[in-house]
Image (cartoon, rainbow, N blue to C red):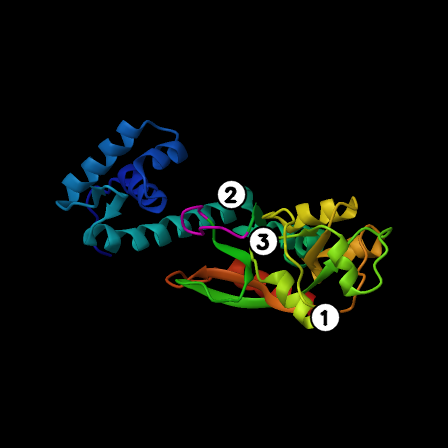
């Protein structure tokens, strides 16, 4: 075993947080210390190493080559230590999995099945963080994230979970006999502008001018549609419970698949055993 000099653990942890956050100010908030304390720890570490780890630029904090070499080693090491501590605390042989999940998938698929996950894999402790499909895994201290899209994200390794065909859903009291009747109603929109035009093309109709409100949450769109205040184009598998309860109805059979749900991790990070177990479990549930 190689000799270890006095290792400045506090300074190394401060460096990892500052590098992940990209800011001394955000690092101070996460660590619950002052920005001056963060600067002091970084200066101490740089003095110990004899190398500069960060440079301040007009665009913010930028790691030097030495910082870029050190960061992935520290990130992996601290993550491994945290997982092992979580596993052995109180004699529990468990692994904590910090997972970011787009809210639609969380509420429409994952949360209703959490009891089954705990039953099948009691060795996994799941910590959920929901988002509107915009998530930074490393900066937010997550192990992985489930998001909606094409499966192609720069710097990420994506594992397919399930496709999500989209179709109109609305309140049951609306009188809709053909897709052309949608022109008389408010069409709720997401930030993906091509959804309604592609659905109308699939239904054999010309898309009308889109003037309805734009929302970044499918769950919010579903709530508005259930009140009869608009028609929502939604990923149908995520709203099966609403349809079964009669809260929302699907007036037309036409659907269009513009993406799916994927479990993603950074390309330079190993998949943890808990992440691998979760992916296999989800795929088995989908099958």
Judge left or right: residue 42 versus residue 275: left
Q: Are marks 2 and 3 in contact (CB under 8 Å)?
A: no
Is residue 30 depicted above or below 252 in this figure?
A: above
User: At x 36% / y 54%, what residue is drawn?
Assistant: 76
Q: Residues within 10 Å of mark 1 (few under 14, many from 20)?
A: some
Q: What is the magenta range?
A: 133-141
- Say whether residue 134 is magenta: yes
Please give left or right for residue 162 compared with residue 68 in the image: right
Q: CA distance from mark 1 to mark 2?
A: 56 Å
Numbered-mark total: 3
Residue at image x 74%, y 69%?
Answer: 254
Residue contact at pointers 1 and 2, CB within 8 angstroms = no
Residue 284 drawn in magenta: no
Residue labelled with disc 3:
124
The dot on residue 203 is: 1
Residue name at image x 32 percent, y 45 percent? 16
User: Is the residue marked by circle 2 packed among few (<14), some (14-19), or many (20+) residues within 10 Å?
Assistant: few
The x and y percentages for residue 23 are 32, 39
The disc label shown at residue 89, or none: 2
- Residue 163 visible (yes or no): no
The image quarter containing residue 162 is: bottom right
How far apart marks 2 and 3 lie (CA) works out to 14 Å
């Amino acid at each position: 075993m190689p000799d270890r000099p006095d290792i400045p653990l506090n300074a190394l942890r401060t460096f990892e947080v500052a590098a992940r956050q990209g800011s001394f100010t955000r690092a101070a908030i996460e660590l619950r210390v002052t920005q001056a304390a963060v600067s002091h720890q970084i200066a101490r570490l740089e003095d110990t190493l004899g190398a500069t780890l960060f440079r301040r630029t007009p665009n913010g904090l930028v790691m030097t080559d030495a910082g870029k070499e050190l960061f992935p080693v520290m990130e992996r090491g601290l993550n491994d230590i945290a997982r092992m501590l979580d596993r052995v605390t109180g004699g529990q042989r468990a692994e904590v999995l910090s997972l970011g999940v787009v809210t639609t998938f969380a509420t429409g698929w994952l949360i209703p099945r959490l009891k089954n996950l705990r039953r099948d894999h009691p060795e996994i402790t799941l910590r959920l963080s929901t988002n509107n499909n915009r998530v930074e895994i490393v900066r937010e201290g997550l192990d992985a994230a489930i998001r909606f899209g094409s499966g192609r994200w720069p710097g990420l390794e994506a594992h397919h979970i399930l496709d999500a065909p989209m179709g109109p859903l609305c309140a049951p009291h609306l009188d809709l006999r053909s897709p052309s009747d949608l022109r008389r109603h408010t069409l709720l929109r997401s930030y993906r502008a091509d959804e309604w035009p592609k659905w109308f093309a699939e239904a054999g109709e010309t898309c009308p001018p889109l003037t309805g409100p734009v929302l970044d949450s499918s769950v919010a769109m579903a709530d508005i549609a259930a009140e009869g205040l608009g028609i929502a184009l939604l990923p149908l598998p995520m709203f099966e419970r609403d349809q079964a309860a009669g809260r929302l109805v699907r007036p037309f059979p036409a659907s269009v698949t513009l993406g799916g749900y994927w479990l993603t991790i950074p390309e330079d990070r190993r998949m943890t055993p808990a992440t691998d177990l979760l992916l296999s479990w989800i795929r088995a549930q989908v099958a």
